[in-house]
Image (tube, coloured by chain):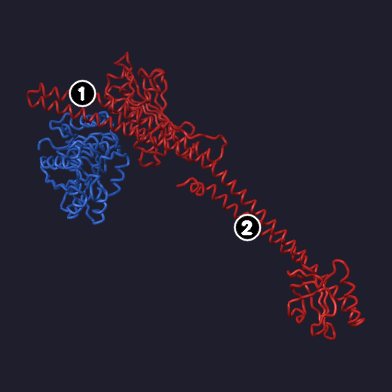
Amino acid sequence: MRMKILVIEDDQEAAAYLVKAFREAGHVADHAPDGLEGYALAREGQYDVLVVDRMLPKLDGLSVIRSLREQGVDTPVLILSALGQVDDRVKGLRAGGDDYLPKPYAFSELLARVEVLARRRSAPAGEPTTYRVGDLELDRLSHRVVRGDSEIVLQPREFRLLEYLMKHAGQVVTRTMLLENVWDYHFDPQTNVIDVHVSRLRSKIDKGHERPLIHTVRGAGYMVRDGAR
Amino acid sequence: MTALGKLLRTTAFKLSVAYLVVFVLFAGFILGYVAWNARRVLDDQIMGTVEAEITGLAEQYRIGGIRRLVGVIDRRTREPSASLYLVTTFSGERLAGNVGALPAGVLDDPGIRETDYRRNDETDPVPRRALVRVFVLQGGFRLLVGRDVEERERLGQVIRRALGLSLGLVTVLACLGGWFVTRRVLKRVDAMTDTTRTIMAGDLDGRLAIAGTGDELDRLAQNLNAMLDRIGELMAGMKEVSDNIAHDLKTPLTRLRNRAEEALRTAKTPEDYARALESTIEESDNLIRIFNALLMIARLEAGNAAQPMEDFDAAEVARGVAELYEALAEEAGTPLAVEVADDLPVHGSRELIGQALANLLDNALKYGAAEDGMNEPTPVAVVAGRNANRVEIAVTDRGPGIPEGERGRVLERFARLEGARSKPGFGLGLSLAAAVARLHGGELRLEDNAPGLRAVLSLPLKAGAAA
């Protein structure tokens, strides 16, 4: 999916790097060097995602977001912040941001999150009750997971893990995104706890099947997709 | 500002002046009241005497006519300390009495009044004052009887002098006292100011002098000293942190640099370069991790978590974190036992407590393996429950444990035991857990699990929760 991304960032070098990297990933990216210009560009509402730095000249990032929300602009916003204060995330989300990433960040992490945000917007309203990827089917109401003809028994947490992966099928999901959305923690676990959970889930889902559905994306995270594609 | 100006501006001096004014007003009021009352009493007395004499003289006139009245008055005027008398005809012609001159018109107007007068045997040019009564007798004769009020005036003078004297004395004393107190306070405040100046100039070891009187200035100085102690501690902590950061970031930074250099020197193929770059990114990620952990510890220790504090169930967090690590434990072949009591309400940051527990579990899984029987599964347990009014979450292992003498040290930043240096880690996990516990008013206890380590995160039970 090709996205239109606006990067509001005053650091020229960082902004140039982001714009270039987004374009390489196949997206369209514009850049605004300060809060006022960013606000002016963003309020037209033609962007899929805004990437907003918190500290901006003329109008700070949170004010940009707040003003846009007051104007009824509901473009998803990802906040970048070098402040690193523990409550930064809360403040950012309260101002109307949709996701938050502290600096320094890995671009793969940023890209994965931006894509999820853009997809969330373009997805039809209302979550489907079943997710289907290849011959894998997950029923969110009955909590049943079926691959081919056989039902797979999952622990509650494994179910939520698979649910999140399947909800974002075709998209890269990073380890921190999994920790945040499946376990609701935002700290850095420092160990490969998430990898172990995914590999355990993978052994239940993919074992004995020719086509694996849970893929590891090197240097980024995981992705559920039909391997045949 | 001049020394005098400074003195005049002090609170002590202003207070002295205010008290002086209040006292003077009060003293003036009291003396004035006394003087007024005394004068009234004296006047009443005089008027009583005058009335009695007039009644007596009118009686004499009634009995013996003007001749007899004149005779009586002549006799009375010769008595010592006689009252004032004057009898005239209706036209003002003097018949008898000891009053010489009177202001014009006094005799025409019967009644009581105060007036100037002169005795007829006196030549003093200054008239005297008297309280008199003029009475019109039958036949048009005027009778004036009065008393000199010199006594009353003297009393007034005495009181006025007393007032002046006491006010003067009070003013002088108050000024002296105010000046003395002000100078004393000012001297101590100046000493404090000097000390604070040197402290501001960078000498954090300076402390304010305590006079030992236990007064408000002493208390202020004590509090300021306590504050300086705390600031000193924080500064020392900051310095230690920055020293440690400088030291411990140098190692990974050097490694990073060496790898990059080596790659430049030896790499031949694009794959070599890619591998070198990947390890460079990995290494820099580690640096970022160390940095974040250090910043977080520093903020927590400064009491500035800036993290939303809420009521939550520590049991849910303990189970959740245990569940997060359960897969890892299973992969490592370490049984993870979870024994968590229900309903452990705590007020604080769920996120931080979760992170502290994750660090403890991470340590237990990393270092908790028994040294000898490497194949033997060594159980790790998460046990949470209430202990009096505390919520205690213990993470236990059966590993080598931590020698008693080292338990204090491992809570410090970057402290790592000898045996742990070969394993990945930065020596920040326990420091962070301890800082989280302290922020919540709790503590992190390291105990002997005989064998192994028992790390207890002890937190206060939410206020108001049934113990």
Which of the image's four quarters has the C terminus of chain A? top left
**Badge 1 is on which residue?**
B255
* Kind of residue at badge 1: Arg
In terms of secondary structure, where does tag 1 sit?
helix
Q: CA distance from mark 1 to mark 2?
A: 85 Å
- Name the image quarter holding residue B108: bottom right
Task: Judge from the rendering whether residue B456 lies leftward or rightward of residue B420; answer left or right.
Answer: right
Q: Is residue B343 visible?
A: no
Which of A129 and B152 lies nearest the eye of the viewer? B152
Number of other residues with Cα within 10 Å of mark 2, as a class: few under 14, some 14 to 19, many 20 or more? few
Residue B169 pos. (x, y %): 65, 51
Residue B75 pos. (x, y %): 90, 73
In terms of secondary structure, where does tag 2 sit?
helix
Task: Judge from the rendering whether residue B203 lies leftward or rightward of residue A23; answer left or right.
Answer: right
Task: Judge from the rendering whether residue B369 lies leftward or rightward of residue A72; answer left or right.
Answer: right
Supply the letter of whichever chain is red. Answer: B
Compared with B187, B269 (above or below) is above
- Name the image quarter holding residue B347: top left
Q: Colour of chain A?
A: blue
**Badge 2 is on which residue?**
B25
